Image: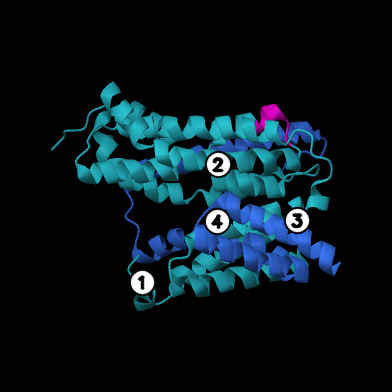
């Protein structure tokens, strides 16, 4: 049955359904704004990144890789790997937006972030069939992200020495907090141990930031190769 | 791959463009693949474990190989993040801990 639609009313519903998650994104965006200045991005670069990449975890990660000798290939490859979860999210919405044609499907997924994807999938489960719901939620999240990036940079415009205040640890703290949020139970432990061990080994023997990709792939491979009964229901 | 002669500014813009393209590809490819590819349980487990594994790989050297200050501050950051589920608060706690511990221990 094909009952999918794409209307302004659906856009509005998606926008208001996503206001609370957008507030969380706003606070997170302030953090990106602060870190982007510390990493040496110009205002235009930080705002363009938030507008066109629009993917929080990978942008924060890129700040860790940023510097004068920036390895473009490493940054792009790492971004690709971090955002591979989008592939699953896109596959999940395909039955909803598929019937509406490529322009509405492929245009709208540009705005698909974790927050509005979750909100719209919850609405879909309740019977929402207006695909503009995803675009509306995405607009709320996207504008919050962009505004917060700018504001975060304004707020920390004239900070003298970040390391003296412990701010060099801000990256690590942010990633640890994000990691804590990904904890689902003891089944996460083996892949994370493998990831940590591989990361340390590559970090010790190879220059640059390849330890991130090596550790990430090693941990995920460990999760994929685990016997099925140990994998849990999630 | 990337010419060494490029200025730092040009490299930054190139990286931003590449990141934007890579991210959009991940968003669009799920739609494209869904009709012709069904991911087995192992493939799903791989994708599901990616974010946590990558984050672990990022922090491992900083947490385990920097020294006692960073190690202790990491424990505190995780504790605050687990209790309050608040990213800015956890970041603040970690930074404040590093600041205080450096005054005390270094």
Contact flag, marks 1 and 3 (Cβ < 8 Å)? no
Q: Residue at the spot x=30%, y=30% of the render?
A: A13
User: From mark 2 to mark 1, how far is it between C-alphas?
Assistant: 32 Å
Same-subunit check for callouts 2 and 4: yes
Secondary structure of residue under mark 2: helix
Between disc 1 and disc 3, the foreground one is 1
Q: Is residue A216 visible?
A: no
Same-subunit check for callouts 4 and 1: yes
Between disc 2 and disc 4, the foreground one is 2
Quarter of the picture holding the C terminus of chain B: bottom right
Secondary structure of residue under mark 4: helix
Magenta residues? A41-46
Disc nearer the start of the sequence (4/3) = 4
Same-subunit check for callouts 4 and 3: yes
User: From mark 4 to mark 1, how far is it between C-alphas?
Assistant: 21 Å
The cyan-coloured chain is labelled A
Between disc 4 and disc 1, the foreground one is 4
Residue of label 4: A178
Residue of label 2: A27
Specify the quadrant of the image occupied by residue A153.
Answer: top right
Q: How is the image coloured?
A: by chain
Residue of label 1: A232
Chain where mark 3 sits: A
Between disc 2 and disc 1, the foreground one is 2
């Amino acid at each position: 049955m094909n009952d999918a639609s794409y209307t302004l009313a659906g856009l509005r519903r998606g926008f208001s359904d996503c206001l609370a998650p957008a507030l969380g994104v706003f606070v997170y965006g302030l953090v990106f704004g602060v870190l982007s200045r510390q990493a040496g991005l110009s205002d235009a670069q930080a705002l363009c990144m938030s507008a066109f990449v629009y993917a929080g975890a990978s942008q924060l990660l890129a700040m860790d890789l940023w510097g004068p000798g920036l390895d473009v290939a490493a940054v792009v490859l790492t971004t690709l790997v971090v955002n591979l979860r989008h592939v699953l999210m896109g596959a999940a919405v395909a039955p909803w937006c598929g019937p509406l044609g490529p322009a509405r499907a492929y245009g709208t997924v540009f705005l698909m972030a974790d927050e509005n994807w979750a909100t719209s999938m919850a609405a879909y489960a309740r019977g929402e069939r207006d695909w503009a719901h995803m675009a509306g939620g995405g607009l709320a999240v996207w504008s919050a992200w962009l505004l917060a990036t700018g504001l975060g940079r304004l707020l920390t415009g004239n900070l003298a020495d970040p390391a003296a205040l412990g701010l060099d640890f801000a990256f690590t703290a942010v990633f640890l907090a994000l990691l804590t949020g990904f904890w689902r139970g003891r089944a996460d432990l083996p892949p994370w141990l493998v990831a940590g061990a591989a990361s340390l080994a590559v970090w010790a023997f190879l220059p640059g930031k390849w330890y991130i990709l090596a550790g990430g792939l090693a941990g995920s491979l460990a999760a994929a190769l685990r016997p099925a009964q140990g994998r849990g229901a999630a | 791959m990337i010419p060494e002669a490029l200025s730092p500014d040009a490299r930054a813009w190139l990286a931003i463009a590449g990141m934007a393209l890579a991210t959009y590809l991940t968003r669009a490819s799920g739609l494209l693949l869904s009709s012709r590819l069904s991911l087995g349980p192992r493939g799903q487990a791989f994708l599901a474990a990616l974010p946590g594994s990558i984050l672990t790989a990022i922090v491992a050297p900083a947490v385990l190989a920097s020294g006692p200050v960073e190690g202790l501050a990491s424990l505190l950051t995780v504790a605050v993040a687990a209790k309050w589920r608040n990213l800015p608060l956890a970041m603040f706690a970690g930074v404040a801990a590093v600041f205080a511990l450096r005054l005390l221990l270094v």
